[in-house]
Amino acid sequence: MKMKNGSLMTGAGLAEAVGEILRRKGIQAAVNELMKREVALGLRKPTLAVYDHAFHFIGGAQKYGLTMISALKDLFDITILANRDIGYGKFREWYDLDLSSIPVKVIPLPYFDERKAVNLDPALVSRDIENPFHRISRESGRYDVFVNNSMNEMVFPLACVSVLICHFPERRPRSYFYADQYTRVVCNSRYTAEWIGKKWGFAPHRLLYPPVDMEAGGIDVPKKKIILSATRFEPEGFKRQREMIGAFLKLCRQRPEAVGGWKFILAGGSQPGNPYLAGLKDMIAGEAGGCVELKVNVTAAELKSLYREAALFWHMCGVKREDPGETEHFGMTTVEAMQNAVVPLVYDGGGLPEIVDHGVNGFLVGSTAELLERTLALIGDPAKTEALGRAAWKKSRLFSRSNFETTARSIFGEVLNLLVSPETSIPG
């Protein structure tokens, strides 16, 4: 709020103006205005909270939010908001990020706690009950800037400036839908942007591709006879590990002379008691030779070692699925593989065509049959595999962590300008 001469309003004039906001818009809007003035006058560093209801799981979206925090910690006084206890050691182990200087505030959600739910999925919430995420909404009003890194449209932002990081527009519930209440919406791919328009009826403000920083040894490291898949073991099977295992076992039975010595390794995070993962273990238990391996909840160092050794990368999320939400929204692990000159053979859908240029640095396939055909061709042509791997490494530079950090700082520089602008709208 400024006077006619452009100087910041203080003293009695500010008190009168805030009192008018209190009468017209309520206490939260008045508090927000006072917080804005403190920042604009340089009385303190602006505060920012980043929330994700799945920070206690290892995942690409969580790496996205936490890497963003690391890039912004000199601009803001940051707090991590979570719903489950999570130690800093996990952030370092899972993502190679040291966030020990950033406080973590745990906000329990009784609705999920009473049901002993590990997965705090908003889709599990019945529409005829009180929104359990209102606790997060109330907390958001304590900060100058609130960032919702979840695919959770049920959190209403009360901060003066708010940012929704949309990894994909999962749903548009008939109630508790607040995605259109955020000051800025940032998406992770053009594919996601397209579906935000289709599902939500508006365009996101900015595109911020995910950060990828898993290069383990350059492009001249000798490769082993390993096909790698790296993605979370979702209980619903969205990542299609069962289909890929079935395809590889079929290849071993039908073309043993071609794939002799080759191994298929599937690495990824999983919650405890995952029935889908248990089914995968049963699927490979009777296979002789151990040609398929499951590596669960590997550390960043272990995953880097797998990328360094693997020659080919499979990712088939989206195959035989019609729901756009069940296709890869971007594909961070595909880029991670490409950073290590691993040739990607991935499903032709979702955000993956933004990463892989068919026939130039990998292949886009529409079925497991085509996946096997392309795989056999590469196994039989080491020179082409090496050339594609080098091209994959080159393309992966576009999605580096440094590019992510530069763009993130640009976006939140705009957010800071909005925060101190007298024209910024105030919730309430």
Image (spheres, grey):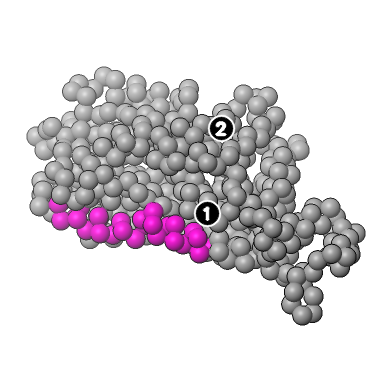
Residue 277 visible in the displayed image: yes
- Residue 406: image location, x then y, percent: 44, 61
- Report the side of 337 relative to 256 (left or right): right
The residue indicated by pointer 2 is: 119
Q: Is residue 80 above or below residue 263?
A: below
Looking at the picture, tell me which residue is in the foreground, 265 or 393. 393
- Report the side of 72 relative to 173 (left or right): left
Looking at the picture, tell me which residue is in the foreground, 218 or 379. 218
Whole-number angstrom distance, CA of label 2 to CA of label 1: 32 Å
Q: Which residues are magenta?
A: 386-411
In what quadrant of the picture does the C terminus appear? bottom right
Q: Secondary structure at mark 1?
A: loop
Kind of residue sitting beneath label 1: Asp
Instruction: Please tell me whether residue 393 belongs to the stretch shown in magenta.
Output: yes
Instruction: Please tell me whether residue 416 belongs to the stretch shown in magenta.
Output: no
In what quadrant of the picture does the N terminus appear? bottom right
- Report the side of 137 relative to 321 (left or right): right
| Point 43% across, 53% down: residue | 210
- Residue 150: image location, x then y, percent: 57, 46
Q: Nearer the viewer, mark 2 or mark 1?
A: 1
